[in-house]
Amino acid sequence: MLVGAKHLEDKLSVIAKNSSPNASPVQLSVVSCQLSVVIYDQSPMTNDQ
């Protein structure tokens, strides 16, 4: 999980650097949502017993 999250953080940094200073909050929200979903999907399921 940590490796995937770190990779996405790096990707997010690149996107932030390459986008204009006026990047819309919507774009940032979408990327953040994708990041959260991937991290959640990679988390171990604690309810699966």
Image: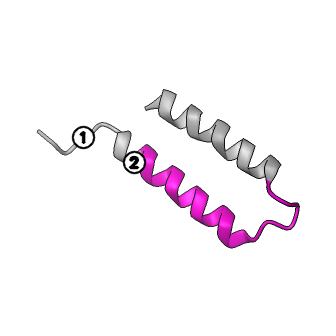
- Residue 41 x %, y %: 35, 46
- Give the label on residue 46, or none: 1
Q: CA distance from mark 2 to mark 1?
A: 12 Å
Range covered by the magenta-colored residues: 19-39
Observer-nearest residue: 20 or 46? 20
Left or right: 28 with respect to 2?
right
- Residue 26 x %, y %: 66, 72
Task: Classify mark 2: helix, strand or loop.
Answer: helix
- Give the label on residue 32, or none: none
User: Which quadrant of the structure image shows residue 24?
Assistant: bottom right
Specify few, some or many for label 2: CA neighbours under 10 Å numbering under 14, 14-19, or 20 or more.
few
Specify few, some or many for label 1: CA neighbours under 10 Å numbering under 14, 14-19, or 20 or more.
few
- Judged by depth in the image, the label closer to the viewer, 2 or 1, is 2
User: Which quadrant of the structure image shows residue 6?
Assistant: top right
Residue at image location 59% in from the left, 57% down from the top? 32
The residue type indicated by label 2 comes to: Tyr
- Give the label on residue 40, or none: 2
